[in-house]
Image: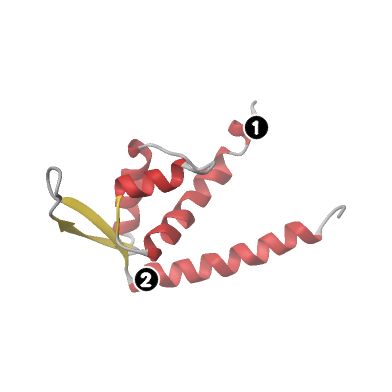
Amino acid sequence: MSLNDKFLPIRKGLLEFLLLKIIAAEKVYVADILRQLSETEFATQEGTLYPLLSKMRREGLLDYEWKESEAGPPRKYYELTAKGREQLRELTEYWQKISGTVKSLGPR
């Protein structure tokens, strides 16, 4: 099993957290999300992203609006709902807690 395969469940779990962080910064189009993720170890594809965004919308964490595009058809721009902002706050606190725990255990 490769290292990437070993950490796949962790990466998948963190992807929703990262999407909340990206979308919290500004209303964002899927291509912008993919570009930001492509610069990290969380690079993904539309086939992974769209189902996750749909799930998050059904859960009330985000919504979208259609905006006209200068190049082609209208685009969906995603933004966080109040519930999404609250989830991001909770996940950020949890991340800080577990990150501190990981750093505090074992050799330094």
What amino acid does circle 2 point to?
Answer: Lys
**Residue 88, above or below 19:** below
Give percent across and percent down for residue 40: 52, 44
Q: In the displayed image of the protein, which residue is found farthest to the top?
A: 1
What residue is rendered at 12% in x and 54% in y? 68
Give percent across and percent down for residue 45: 38, 36
Give percent across and percent down for residue 20: 42, 60
- The mark lying in front, picked from 1 and 2, is 1
Give the quarter of the figure containing the C terminus: bottom right
Mark 1 surroundings within 10 Å by alpha-carbon count, few (fewer than 14), some (14 through 19), many (20 or more): few
The residue indicated by pointer 1 is 3
**Residue 24, above or below 47:** below
Q: How is the image coloured?
A: secondary structure
**Residue 16, above or below 47:** below
What residue is rendered at 30% in x and 62% in y? 27
Q: Secondary structure at mark 1?
A: helix
Q: In the displayed image of the protein, which residue is found farthest to the right?
A: 107
**Residue 34, above or below 108:** above
Residue in front for this viewpoint, 21 or 81: 21
The residue indicated by pointer 2 is 83
What amino acid does circle 1 point to?
Answer: Leu
Give percent across and percent down for residue 30: 30, 48
Give the quarter of the figure containing the N terminus: top right
Mark 2 surroundings within 10 Å by alpha-carbon count, few (fewer than 14), some (14 through 19), many (20 or more): few
What residue is rendered at 47% in x and 49% in y? 15
Distance CA(mark 1)–CA(mark 2):
34 Å
Horizontal placement of 82 versus 40: left or right?
left
Residue in front for this viewpoint, 56 or 30: 30
